[in-house]
Image: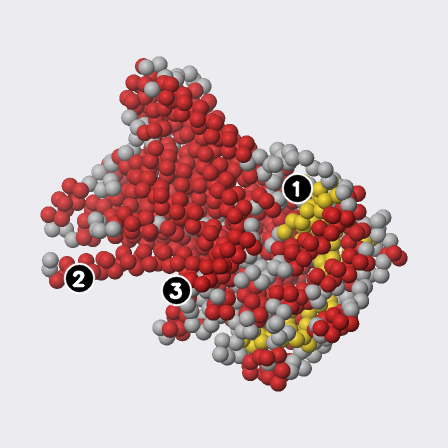
Amino acid sequence: MTRAGTWQHGLRIAAILGLLGAAAFPLYWMFVTSMTPSSELFAPSARLFPKPSEIGVYRDAFHGTSVTTWVINSAIVAVGTTLLSIALAIFPAYALSRFRFRGMGLVGFGLFITQMLPEAMLVVPLYAIFGDLALLNTLTGLILANSAFTVPVITWILKGAIDGVPIDIEEAARIDGCSRFDIVIGVVLPLVAPTLAAAAVIAFFHGWNEYIFAQTLISDQGLRTASVGLAGFVGELSTPVHTVMAIGLMYTLPAVIFYLFVQRYVVAGMTAGSVKG
Amino acid sequence: MKPQSRTVGWAFSLLVATVLAATAPTTAFAQAKEVITFAAVTFSEAGRGDRLKAWIDKFNKSQNAIEVQPVALPFASFAKTIFTQMGGGAGPDLVRFDQIDFYAAVAANRVLQLDEIINDRDYKFTAPDRYMKVGGKRYGTPFEISNYVLLYNPTLVKDRKAPANFDEFLATAKAASGNGVYGFAYRATMAEAPGFWQDLCNFVYGFGGRWSDEQGNLTLNSPKVIEGVIAYKKMYDAGVTPKGTDAATYRRMFWEGKLAMEIDNGGVAGIFNQQAPDLPLAAAPSPFPTRAQGLVLAPFTVNANTKHKTAAFTFYKWVLQPENQKQLQDLLGASNVATVVQRSPEDLAKRPWLKVYDEQTPNSIPQLVQGQELKTPEILQIVLEHVLKVLQGGADPKTTMDDAQKQAQARVARK
Amino acid sequence: MTPDQAATRDIALAKQPARTARLEGSRWTPYLFVAPVLYLLVFQGYPLLQELVLSFTSTSLLSPAEHTFVGGQNYADLVGTTDFHHVLLITAIYTVACVVLSIGLGLVAALLLNAPFAGRGVARAMVTIPWAAPPVAVALIFTWMLNAQYGIFNRALRALGFAAGAENWLDNPSLALPAILITTIWQIFPFASVVILAALQGVSQEQREAAVIDGADRLSVFRAVVWPTIQPSVMLLALFITIWSLRRFDLIWLMTQGGPIGATNTLVIELYRRAFVYRDLGQAAAVGMVGLSIAILVTMVYFRLTLRAERTKGQR
């Protein structure tokens, strides 16, 4: 290798390492902060590595707060949002890909509009609707509200992937006597599985992260989600920084781990959606 | 192909149905008691929250018809959440408001008028109870009344002596700063706008300023208000405050011995004392030209949307019983409650700072723009943004506050 | 036209590839299939309509059912105040910076991670971690890292001898927006890199090699071969990031509440403050409608541009 080549190679490695460092550092710092005694947090110089003897902060967080309940509630909302939004998006996505019908442009544009609406704007009218439908104070209500924001984007992603499924495969199944419903579920869906995974991740994160609805539509302590529980510590009297960071990490890690498991499919799914077209 | 696709379809529907069913509310289980809810910021505070819950448990155990359920909501989102719920025809049955939000709720008829159940002659109410009446009618009683004084850590202050005036205050703060210790802490960020307002009120009131005159005309640019703002700025520039550190953190620093002084309410002193009994803690009147300081006044109200009016009133009256008032006052720290409760001599001897707080009562003024209670959130925003311009940009206090006055007047005039 | 571009065009125009007309079915089948979208009418369409009505009324958060119609007063108030012009300016700066910086960084990351090297799989996974972190948690840790005295940013800056190490990031009118941007970019650039990485898989290896053999340098290869392939994906990405930035709330509200002195006061923050702090639903709705109009305008411009790009390519 030439001298210039080596140099470039080194630069490249450095850039990649820098990128990875920047991406991972805040979570590492959350961990370090959680494992630093409160008195050392305000010391003139920072502790750069966690202090193992401080592991008790996690036990305190478990016992002293409802973090377990919060995380479970977030998980229910996230999984529910994922399942519901995919169930609701599949058929419209198929229709937008395969059919030509009057009002199609309107449906497409309408889906785009919903991406532009901030939750903060809709929360007051939604509260009244939820009151009428007896959905206040239920996780079901949160799932319904969140899915309204994820269905449109998932519909678009799935439509892109279904566009890439050759029509001949469907026709073969049709000759076998399958109904259109069966074709979508049994033939098309498995073929767009990677994209489905990407869609699932988007919906899952939305449900896991959502804050305004969870704060307003839920008042029962036992149904509180982790985003609301954690935000409650901001500006809160006397909860030590390291405990808050521990809870923050307990809320962040499940999402990151889930993501690390499915991330291969996400890239593949996005690739399928855009490339096969 | 065909049967398989059916199965997938069924499995999918089943999965959705299961999740929806699993997340349905669990209101089905038998409820022998009538459950009413009570929302308060206090429930989410360390130490005090648990003590308050235990106090409510006493009521729950005392009888078998009603069960009061505490609803803990954090300070930052409390009013926003409760107001949305009340506007939507729901919300907790009982609410401990902050005073600023109380007036909004009264104006919108969202809390019940209480004259029928509370007869003034039956109780010996404390002085700030007068703020609970709007248009001559009672809409609440004080749940917690808390004054502001200077809290300090004697081991960090020169000669273990509290400053007596503002110049000494600055000098003491400077002397105490260094080696990782800060002399004083207060809030000066929009991320903590409500706390910033409380701290600013103390400085402005202390220098004799008021946000409005007796007719409710704004006086944001009156000389005394400007003096208070200049004092706030002097403290900001003295290099003695941990800038940008939020209240939760600097209060923590106080009990780690990293902060010498702060001006805070009696609830905070109570928390320090409960959570860190060994912490050297002393109190003195705030070192300003006048004794006037802000006042935390938290009205206890009944939601007009309640479907459990009788039960709510039963609990309400229980709260006002002398014995329960005494326990409430004790658990809240250096605060007072709706009715006059004498502190025990042992208590006063053990916690000398209690007396300093109690003596502040005649000089406490609500942190509101009087006569403009409903517009206070907007006026507050304007005032804080302008004060920040003085603190941060070094804008001239006089012209900046003139500007604030003009903007706020325009805002008040609208509608 | 590459298949990728075709897909993007279909998304953009909501158009139908002609090949599908062969599947027969009842005239009503398509409508049956899009029926689930009706659910959006209940949870988005109807509330949106109510907001539109609210924007012409004076309504309190505490009594949302009692309106006083005030005509265009709420809008007139917005147009007339310099504060609101400032909000629009901050929103524009924030949005443009988010789009440019996250796509720029995302592109660099995607290009770095596209070339083969040992441990590429792990690196690809790691780089996207920020995207998985919940915004509330991100706001919390960044606020702590940006703390003037105890934050690691300032400790590091001070150790390196920079004067900025004494600055109070979230509290300083000229540094608060950069601080919020750093946080936002950290959170969203991985999404951009994932999308671009996916698009890069469509770059033809032969064409790239042919260009290299022709003696083209890296930049020319990128411009001639890589960019045309990924351009439609990048455009679509830009549109989504624009829309998402216009409505981002949690991160900004928890870190600065739009302050100091309005330095980070975007449209959604202004909307939230008017609705929930000032309790003025009418004014808030008017702010929301202005925001929605801007988002629709941006989307329409985007569709126009894509369409024109398609046409020019067609003529070539």
Q: Are marks 2 and 1 on the same chain?
A: no
Mark 2 vs mark 1, foreground winner is: 2
Dots 3, 1 in contact, CB < 8 A: no
Q: Residue at x 10, y 47 (%)?
A: C213
Up the image or down, B236 lies above or below C226; here it is below
Which chain does tag 3 point to? A
Circles 3 and 1 on the same chain: no
Q: Quick check: can you spot residue B410?
A: no
Q: Residue at x 74, y 48 (%)?
A: B61
Which class describes the residues within 10 Å of circle 2: few (<14), some (14-19), or many (20+)?
Answer: few
Q: Are marks 2 and 3 in contact (CB under 8 Å)?
A: no
Left or right: residue B176 compared with residue B271: left
Front residue of C97/A102: it is C97
In the picture of the structure, the residue carrying the numbered disc 2 is: A7
Q: Where is residue C191 shown, x and y percent of the image?
A: 36, 47
Mark 2 falls on what kind of element?
helix
Report whether A150 appears left or right of A222. left
State the mark number for residue B88.
1
The residue positioned 52% from the left and 67% from the top of the image is: B245
- Depth check: give the residue in front, B257 or C300: B257
Residue designated by label 3: A49
Seen at 52% across and 52% down, the residue is: A62
Front residue (pair B395, B129): B129
Q: Image quarter for residue A45?
A: bottom left
For disc 1, the chain is B
